[in-house]
Image (cartoon, helix red, strand yellow):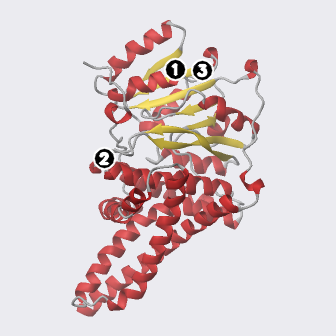
Amino acid sequence: MHRLLLGFFETCLYVSSIGLIAVGSGFLALIGIKVYDLLGPPHWRNHLPRAFLPELDLPDVLVQIPLFNENEVALGAIQSAVALNWPRDKLHIQMLDDSTDDTPILIAGVVADLAARGVKIIHVRREDRTGFKAGALEAGLRISNAPLIALLDIDFRPPPHWLRDVVPILIADPDAGFVQSRCEFANYRTNWLTRVQGMMLDAHFVVEQAGRFRGGWLFQFNGTGGVWRRTAIAEAGGWSADSISEDLDLTVRVALAGWHGLFVMEPAIPGLVPERIDHWRVQQRRWSTGFVQVARKLLGKIWSVPWSLGFKLSASFLIFVQAFYPCAAIASVSLVACILLRTGNAMPYVPLLSLIGVLIVIIAVGLTLVPYVTLKRGPLWRYIATVLLVPPAMVFISLSNAPAIVKTMFGANESFKRTPKSAKAVGESSGRD
């Protein structure tokens, strides 16, 4: 029995370690692309082309802001949308409000006042939350015919010139279905958890998203801070609630329909990261299980279309990147079990642990150091203190969320749970007494 248990846990350890190495290899490739981006020939760093758009030819833009019981940050979202520098008669704003608390009362009066002053803003209410965020976005599209759709989560505050900067880039490429802006995080200095998230998300945007785009890989729309062509959404079949990662789901379906995305580093759009670990767990669990749902739904289609092998691999890596969490959880538990079964002898696993340890160091530094320096996040000592917290934080989330991910792999469904937002975190007044 002892031998069987040891064999089982060692098999789990080595198989999950292979998974970790496979995911890590993808990140090494992205780091390589970033290095080439920084050191390669000048043409690699050329700015994206921009269409010249006379004022009279500017297209109508619909700004969609979905929300659910988030009255603390709702007024700030409205104010930032109204402040966007775009012709008043061509800027349309939808507050897609599925709230069940007093948020609708707060918003209704503000929207009515703005509409009376000529702002094209409406307050969209649904009888139920069918489809959650995807359902709300689809419902909003049905009552608008604007050709371009700007999407913003309730806590994101675009600079006034955002549309002026990104719309000409989207228009200049007729095959681009969307343009994604880099996201900033206004509260990342709040505590150790927000610093860790800020570092990880800087790596995601500056290295991962930019690297995927530069390398011609499939990269995802992040659910906020992007502008879409309505035609691309329609040709992909519209928003779908089959996955709680509706943004990734649409990204893949749009690519299958023949469209691609664009990524821009500037201007960045500030938003929020969770300040409490339980809120972070909810967010990460939603993302991870959503990725698994997308894999179940679309992976077969990815490998059946006439894409190049490299592009199919990049698309698969995008979807399977969340496999890191169950692999890390299984590897951690299996390693402890193996050592216990060997009465504390860890020597047989030192070569494997050394390989994974070196890989972790290279990836952690490779993904985070360039963004930290480029974005001037602070002194070197702060970087070292924060990056040392990243691996344990990732292991914690892996152990916490792995069971839900595994259940989703075998067909279980996960309900959509929004991450709570705070007016204090974004530096705003909630507008309430």
Outermost residue toward the top?
A: 116
Q: In which quarter of the image is the C terminus?
A: top left
* Residue 91 tag number: 3
Which comes before the other along the chain, label 2 or label 1?
1
Q: Which residue matches tag 1?
A: 82
Residue at disc 2, secondary structure: helix
Which comes before the other along the chain, label 2 or label 3?
3
Residue 330 coordinates in the image, percent (x, y): 35, 73
Tag nearer the camera, 1 or 3:
1
Q: Is residue 254 above or below residue 172?
A: below
Along the viewing direction, whichever of 103 and 376 lies nearer the viewer:
376
**Residue at image point 49% right, 11% down:** 115
Mark 1: which amino acid? Val
Mark 2: which amino acid? His
Along the viewing direction, whichever of 113 and 258 lies nearer the viewer:
113
Residue 384 coordinates in the image, percent (x, y): 40, 62
Along the viewing direction, whichever of 38 and 254 lies nearer the viewer:
38
Residue at disc 3, secondary structure: strand
Q: In this view, does 347 lie above or below 173?
A: below
Residue 44 horizontal side relative to residue 182, left or right: right
**Residue at image point 38% right, 84% down:** 11
Residue at disc 1, secondary structure: helix
Q: Which residue matches tag 2?
A: 279
